[in-house]
Image: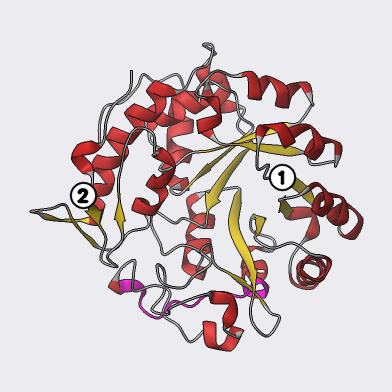
Amino acid sequence: MELNFQFLTLAKFRNGQHVSLTAGSFSKLPAIFQGGEKMDLGNRVVPRRTFLRFATCVAGASFTASLKASDVDVSRAAARVRQIIAHRGASAERPECTAVALNRAIEAGATAVEVDVRTSADGQLFILHDETLDRTTNGKGLATRLTLDQLQRLDAGSWFGATYRGERIPSLVEAAEICRGRIDLLLDLKEQGDEYDRRVVSTVLQHGDPAKTIVGVRSEHQAKRFRQLMPEARQLGLIPTLESMDSFADAGVETIRLWPRWLQDGDAPVKRVHALKKLLLLNGTLGEETETRQLLQFEPDSLSSDHPARLKATLERIALGKPLSLAR
């Protein structure tokens, strides 16, 4: 079964962005989860949270209907999930990649927090998902063209809600210090190169905890370099294609991330991860029960979510063997 999102086309955010939602473009939904406070749906403006709840329900139905996996004991699968990763912090509840999002992830019971690492114009490492500043700050253009001081003068919270006006873009130093001794820190490395890698390692060694750090590597060479520079850290293979899985495994990563869209034709990629004796990470969205149950069919070791509090509660409910809840 495939559901169609055509009736939700031209959902416009406060920043003017339009996203066409179809059953074949589920990967665009994270943009909706990070939208402005209100959304223009043609002849009606609705609160972002209202649209979020509706879109998540519909998207979850389409998404889970398209995945194919053999039936497993989902209660047991829920109990064996070892990592709940807060994607860009608790980004459904707080402005993503900010200090308040990291602290909320810790409060919510996540076991790891994921952040994206970039280099400023003056060679400092900072946390921001997008290449540009437009979506999540009051700045414009490429973020890496500004110095860290210039970046931290921007408002990185008002786009999410007035309560968070004045939130800053954190440096990696600040993120590492927030997480040290409290939660695992997953670094999504947005750049390549020896100088960049060495800066990341130096920052973690001075301000974080290498043993509680997970390095999200994007190339086999980067994986090998981090194994030499920071052997205590675990590694997550952010593989670009299924065909690259074996080479990342050979480079020594402990965990492989698979995109749910890669599982629409069956669980062969999951079986390959297991054959390579690696752990499996799957990305979810808001921790809703229907989506989570479907992801659990693939018996992941880790799940990522924009809403770690809800995902944690959902996993606990499923692990206890409670039936599917239709309550919202």
In the drawing, does residue 167 fall left or right of residue 173? left
Is there CB contact under 8 Å for labels 2 and 1? no
Up/down of 141 relative to 304, above or below: below
Q: Quadrant where the N terminus lies?
A: top left
Residue drawn at 67 percent across, 32 percent down: 242
Q: Is residue 231 visible?
A: no
Side of 144 relative to 68 (left or right): right
For residue 303, the mark is none
The answer to whether residue 279 shows anywhere in this view is yes
Look at label 1 and name its amino acid: Leu
The total number of labels drawn is 2
Mark 1 lies on residue = 236
In the image, the segment drawn in magenta is: 163-174
What residue did someone put label 2 on?
50
Quadrant of res 205: bottom right
Image position, residue 324 (x, y; %): 35, 22
**Disc 2 and disc 1: Cα gap in Å?**
34 Å
Please tell me whether residue 304 is drawn above or below residue 179 in the rendered image: above
With 21 as the anchor, is 142 left or right in this view? right
Quadrant of the rendered image containing residue 144 = bottom right
Q: Looking at the picture, tell me which residue is in the foreground, 206 or 27.
A: 27
